[in-house]
Amino acid sequence: MAKLPVSVCFWDYDRTMPMADGRVQLEGCDPNFTILRPEDAFHRAFYHSEFDITELSFSRFMARYSENNVAYAIIPVFPSRAFRHGALFVRDDRGIETPEDLKGKTIGLYDFEMTAALVARGMLNDEHQILASDINWVVGAVEDASDHISQGDTNNKLKGVNISPVPNGWSLNSLLADGQIDGIVGLYEPSCMATGAPVKRLFSDWRTAEQDYFLRTGIFPIMHTVAIRKSLLAENPWIARSVYNAFCEAKEMALAELQVPQASKVTLPWVVAEYAETAKIMNGDIWPYGFSANRRVIEAMIRWSQNDGLLARPLTAEELFLSEFLEN
């Protein structure tokens, strides 16, 4: 029987590349892999439905799903996850010493709807009672003023939240260095920190803060999920389990490689000890797939999205995922 040709898109994570390099097979399929930066993949998938199987922003998927405006169905596979305490950078001359000091301040971010920003806001709300409406938001490119892919306009859905675009010719980094904004939510340190701007991390010991957060809440935030084109599923319902199994196998292969003490593949001196310490903190499974193991974080992220006005209607965790995976 001929294998089904499918297009597959994801970033080059250690937990996905075993599929692209052939070590893990996508059963029943003849895949054509495209390796793309996540933001590029999201744009091409959400706006052009370009891929049969693709990595997607979890926050953006929830928003589109609530509008019945998405060509994909998702499975409980999460190739990107991250805590975001370490993504909060603030001016050191604005009296910002605690998260509560962010109230009334102006904070920049790449996109209000992006999952990293949702997670940072959700943590601030749950832990420090800060609402999205308590902060003035400026949206735009972090470093290069020309490097901003608009994923959609959220302003029409947000009530009571002040969101402004970055002025022409400016980036968030340049606004921060110039003192026009008080901080940013950024995936990397803003470059102005290296050139002497008075900027610091809000959580100076962010690793400890994130570990403490996990131990208290059990939440390891989801950044991205895996989606399958609905039309492909309608004709080939078996493909969902095939995709799930392949991603799980690839992840287990990556985790095994982190535990090899001889001729380590990872350029980190104490990687085996680091893995063991992380597994102890996270009760063994440091990167869980499946619905049941992630229900708590999924429900929290739905709540954050609802609180921030990103959803057109209330959602349940169960309706987001293909029903055959709700027992996983």
Image (cartoon, rainbow, N blue to C red):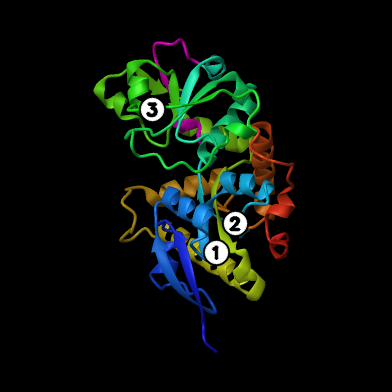
Q: Which residue is mark 2?
A: 289
Count residues near mark 3 (Cα–Cα under 10 Å), then give few for <14, some for 14-19, many for 20+.
many
Q: Which element carries disc 2, helix, strand or loop?
A: loop
Q: Quadrant of the N terminus?
A: bottom right
Q: Are marks 3 and 1 in contact (CB under 8 Å)?
A: no
Report whether 128 appears left or right of 178.
right
Q: How many marks?
A: 3
User: Looking at the picture, does residue 222 appear above or below residue 107?
Assistant: below
**Residue 25, how many percent across, how many down?**
48, 75
Report whether 292 appears left or right of 29.
right
Q: Earlier in the sequence, mark 1 or mark 2?
A: 1
Please, what is the three-letter code of the amino acid marked with disc 1?
A: Cys
- Residue in front for this viewpoint, 206 or 226: 226
Please give the label number shown on residue 172: 3
Q: Which element carries disc 1, helix, strand or loop?
A: helix
Q: Which residue is mark 1?
A: 248
User: Looking at the picture, does residue 173 appear above or below residue 35?
Assistant: above
Q: Write down the quadrant of residue 70 in the picture.
A: bottom right
Q: Which residues are magenta?
A: 84-97
**Residue 53, how many percent across, how many down?**
52, 64
- Residue in front for this viewpoint, 49 or 110: 49
Please, what is the three-letter code of the amino acid marked with disc 2?
A: Tyr
Please, what is the three-letter code of the amino acid marked with disc 3?
A: Leu
Q: Which element carries disc 3, helix, strand or loop?
A: helix
Q: Earlier in the sequence, mark 2 or mark 3?
A: 3
**Residue 204, how many percent across, how many down?**
43, 24
Q: Nearer the viewer, mark 2 or mark 3?
A: 3
Report whether 76 appears left or right of 111.
right
